[in-house]
Each structure stands twice: as structure tokens, then as C-alpha cells.
Image (spheres, rainbow, N blue to C red):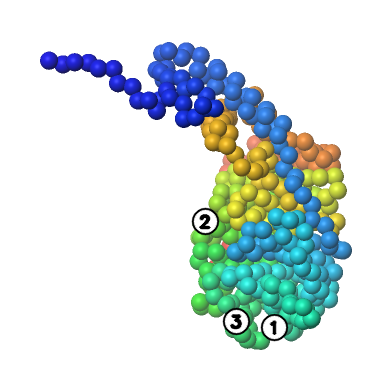
Amino acid sequence: MKVKVLSRNPDDYVRETKQDLQRVPRNYDPALHPFEVPREYTRALNATKLDRVFAKPFIASLDGHRDGVNCMAKHPQSLSTVLSGACDGEVKIWNLMKRECIRTLQAHEGFVRGMCARFCGTSFFTVGDDKTVKHWKMEGPANGEPEEPIHTILGKTVYTGIDHHWREPIFATCGHQVDIWNEQRTSPLCSLTWGVDSISSVKFNPIEMYLLGSCASDRNIVLYDMRQSTALKKVILDMRTNTLCWNPMEASVFTAANEDYNLYTFDMRFLDKPLMVHMDHVSAVLDVDYAPTGKEFVSASFDKSIRIFPVDKGHSREVYHTKRMQHVISVKWTSDNKYILCGSDEMNIRLWKANASEKLGVLSPREKAAMLYNQKLKEKFQHHPQIKRIARHRHLPKVIYSQAKELRIMREARRRKELNRRKHSKPGSIPVISEKKKHIVAVVE
């Protein structure tokens, strides 16, 4: 004989504490909820509007430099420590938790051209206009001790950039050529060159650590292999590339910041065309840095703004600017994926939220659940015209707005001219060149 019994789990309807809300059992059968989609749409619309209401990304400004901030470096072990170098040769170490400078040292005469921290975080390196490479302790000197570098290398030419290996006591400098140095020696282990021009930036690959990428002022991006001490290949673009940054999650992908207002994401195996052209800036892009997730990067531009781009999208998802911020020279994304730092011409370092409307501080479980639910709703309805319009809307400074409008008109005019030429020419005489291939001059191996 079969007996049917009602079985109820107390967890589904009993409160955990007296203060908790009463739990209501719910049947998820869609037939019982005919208005589920309209309700969810309204919630998604409200969540998107509230996102824009609470979008206050600016957190703090770190002031103390007496000249423009020319370069920055992250501490590899400590999230709250960041280093910055200025145009007057001064280096400052900042504590982001207290938002104050914890150490200042006069490192160079003239500009601090580049700086990087050692992988263990105990020391850092700086290069400047005085043709020196200096190795400093991260900890300040004890009472009475002078502020002296551990080690100084005197070079023959000005060094314009420096980067440290991610595992070994080796660093690379660039200037007239790319030099690979051992920390214990005063002469380079090897010198890498291809062509005769000044190199503005050099970066070690964080995954395949023997690979280096460099940008030269003759419009080249050159890739080197440290094991063979040779250059692998180079790509020549229409205009000069200021710097590049490797994707921390994909060994072969890097993004280059160019003078032609665009950023180019390349796969080093296929340099004949970029994976994506990112075009929203209205002036030269001066610096770029990846998020630790490898899904987004932040770019700094001469147009006095910073933008956050998804790797697989051609347009930025966010633009940050303030009235006082001048040309942004350097930018860094913190290792916890929460904040962005930018250093600009008017001597300030600014701290921003990576997600503009994110709430800082501890979230209660209910807040967390509501946030995740709203996030899913926004993803579900992201292509609806009204929600898309509200989510995309940004206030821009008048200069950037009018310049972007002018660039759009120019781009449209060029496209129209090309279509007319093709229409009135012999079929096949004017080939169709994609936007990705337009800016690549040549690839040399």
C-alpha cells in the first residue's frame, strides 16, 4: 500500500533569527507568473538608473609632488603601496590606506623617466635624464643614515624606460637600444637592437618571462627573445606607439597606446592585423595598464581623461575626468582589481574606483544578494534600447565632446569618399581594406 506524505523542510520557511524576514515559499512555475518579464524589466531599468545616480568614481587626490608625475610603479607584494616619479627627479612612496606620502627621495637630476619594483618588493629601480640607473631600498634609511642608493650604474646615453623580470634578478632598460642587466653587474648582459632609433618603453611578458616588447620612435613595435638575445619580429604602424602592456592572463596578447588616438590589441603570433582597434580618445594615448583579470585595461591620454576599455570591445565602457586634471601621463590598475591610479601634469595622483557605482566597505549578505541580482538583470536586458541608452550615457567636457563629434564627421567623410571612388572606378581596382588593417604599414620577421 502506498501512502503519500507531505514533507516540508524547516529551512525553507523558518527564520534563522528573530530579526530576520519571514520566508515565503515560492513556486517557480512560469505559468503562475505571467508578468515576470515586465517586472524584471522595470527592476533592470531602475537598477541601471541607480547605477548612474551612484556613479561617483573619484576617491582621493594625492598631492605633494612639485612637478608633473611622469611615471608610477606598483608594489608587487603590498596593495596599499605605490611609487611615483616626477619631472623634477623626485620619487615618492605613498600609502594608499592613509592617503599620505611615507617617503620622499631626490633620485635624479632632471626627469625620472621610468621606475619598477623588484619582484620580491624589497627594492626598486629608477632611471632618469642624468644617464643613471639607481637601485633603492623600499624601506627608508634608519635614523642618521643618509638617503643613498644601494647601487648606481652610469650609462653612456639617456635611459627612457625600465622593467624588471617577474622571477629573476634581471632587469631591462631602453634608450638608444634595449639592454638586459644583471642586478650584480655594472655592464649589460646583452644589448638588443633593430634599427637605429630611440626606444621609449620596454616591458617583460608576465607569463612567458623571457619575452620582451618595446616601442621605438620610428613607429615600430619590436618583440625580443632574451634566451637567444635576438629580435623576433616587428610591426610598423602609421604613427608612433608610446607604450605597450602585456595581458597578464594571455601570454601572446598585448595592447599598444598610439599617437593616432587609438589603442591596438595584438596577438604576437599574427601581427599582420590587430585583434581589436579601440577608438574613443580624441588625443594621443600616453599610457595603458591591464586589470589583473586580463579582461579590461585602462588608458591615459593627452586629452585630460582616462578610459576603461573591455579587451574585446572597440569603445570604452567608462571615461573619468575632473575639471583640474591636465594631460594624464601615467596610469596603473591596482592588483586587487578595485582601483585605478593616474598621474598627471598638474602634480597630482588621483585614485578612482574601477567600477564607478560600486559601494566601498563591507556589504551585508542581503546587499550582496541584491547587487548580484541587479547585475544579472542588467545583463539580461542590456540590449534593450532604453536600458542601453541610460547605461552608455556619459557627461564629457565640452572640448572632448566637440572634438569627438568633429572626428566622427571626418571619419564619415573619408568613408563616403572611398565609397564614391569605388562606385565610379573599375570593379576590383580599389580594394576594401578593413579598419583593423588600415593602420598597419608592414610586419618584418
Instruction: Judge from the rendering whether residue 311 lies leftward or rightward of residue 87; answer left or right.
Output: left
Q: Which residue is mark 3?
A: 182
Residue 320 drawn above or below residue 256: above
Q: Secondary structure at mark 1?
A: strand
Secondary structure of residue under mark 2? loop
216 or 112: nearer the viewer: 112
Going from N to C along the chain, the mark reached first, 3 or 1, is 1
The reply to whether discs 1 and 2 touch (Cβ–Cβ < 8 Å) is no
- 444 vs 253: above or below: below
Calculate the distance from the C-alpha at mark 2 to the C-alpha at mark 3.
27 Å
Residue at image mark 1: 151
Give the side of residue 111 with respect to residue 287, left or right. right
* Helix, strand or loop at mark 3: strand
Inspect this view and state whether residue 182 appears.
yes
Q: Earlier in the sequence, mark 1 or mark 2?
A: 1
Identity of the residue furthest to the left in this view? 1
Name the residue located 58 percent from the left edge and 77 percent from the top edge: 170
Dividing the picture into quadrants, the one containing residue 402 is top right
Q: Nearer the viewer, mark 3 or mark 1?
A: 1
Question: Where's residue 174, x and y in %?
Answer: 68, 73
Q: Categorize mark 1 by other alpha carbons within 10 Å: few (<14), some (14-19), many (20+).
A: some
